[in-house]
Image: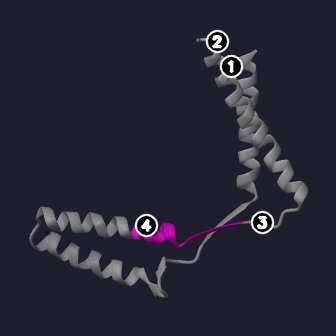
Amino acid sequence: MKNKEKIIGIVLTLIGLFMLFKATRVHSFGFFRFYGISTSGIILVLMIISGIFLVAKPSKLSKIFMIASVCMLVLSLILGTNISFYYASLLDIILILVPLVAGLGLIIKSYITKNKWKY
């Protein structure tokens, strides 16, 4: 019975997450801005300089700077992403949250009752 509750909980949670993700809109407005200044130019200049030093005189420091500039570029792109929700009525929100909350509750209940009998 507990295994059946767990499976139903997982299915309900997946349905709720699917509906939540379907109601979400993700768009990017470019690179992250820091106090109104775009970070893309600074990061690209650092990447070019570290690339020049990596080719001219490869060292551990030039490799670290290249890896750091690539990581900063990826981080800048991620921070420039905007996540918002589509227009949704209260009924839409309830239909999204009920299976999600019920599924998570069933999963937690199955783990609590399973561990309770061990003691």
Task: Name the residue that disc number 3 marks.
Answer: 86
In 3D space, how far apart are the residues under numbered discs 1 and 4 (Cα atoms)? 42 Å
Give the image quarter of residue 2: top right
Of all residues, the one furthest to the top in this rendering is 118
Q: Which residues are magenta?
A: 73-84
Q: Is 58 on the left or on the right of 10, as rendered? A: left
The amino acid type found where label 1 is placed reads: Thr
Task: Name the residue that disc number 4 marks.
Answer: 75
Q: Are marks 2 and 1 in contact (CB under 8 Å)?
A: yes
Task: Name the residue that disc number 1 marks.
Answer: 113
Of all residues, the one furthest to the bottom in this rendering is 36
Q: Is residue 24 above or below residue 112?
A: below
In 3D space, how far apart are the residues under numbered discs 4 and 3 (Cα atoms)? 26 Å
Give the image quarter of residue 71: bottom left
In 3D space, how far apart are the residues under numbered discs 2 and 1 (Cα atoms)? 7 Å
Q: Is residue 97 above or below residue 53?
A: above
State yes or no: residue 2 in magenta: no
State yes or no: residue 82 in magenta: yes
Number of numbered discs visible in the structure rendering:
4
In 3D space, how far apart are the residues under numbered discs 2 and 4 (Cα atoms)? 46 Å
Q: Are marks 3 and 1 in contact (CB under 8 Å)?
A: no
Q: Say which label, 3 or 1, has the lower sequence index.
A: 3
Q: Which mark is residue 117?
A: 2
Image coords of residue 57 (percent x, y): 9, 70
The quadrant in which the N terminus is found is top right
Q: Nearer the viewer, mark 1 or mark 4?
A: 1
The amino acid type found where label 4 is placed reads: Leu
Give SS at disc 1: helix
Q: Say which label, 2 or 4, has the lower sequence index.
A: 4
Q: Is 25 on the left or on the right of 28, as rendered? A: right
Q: Say which label, 2 or 3, has the lower sequence index.
A: 3
Give SS at disc 3: loop
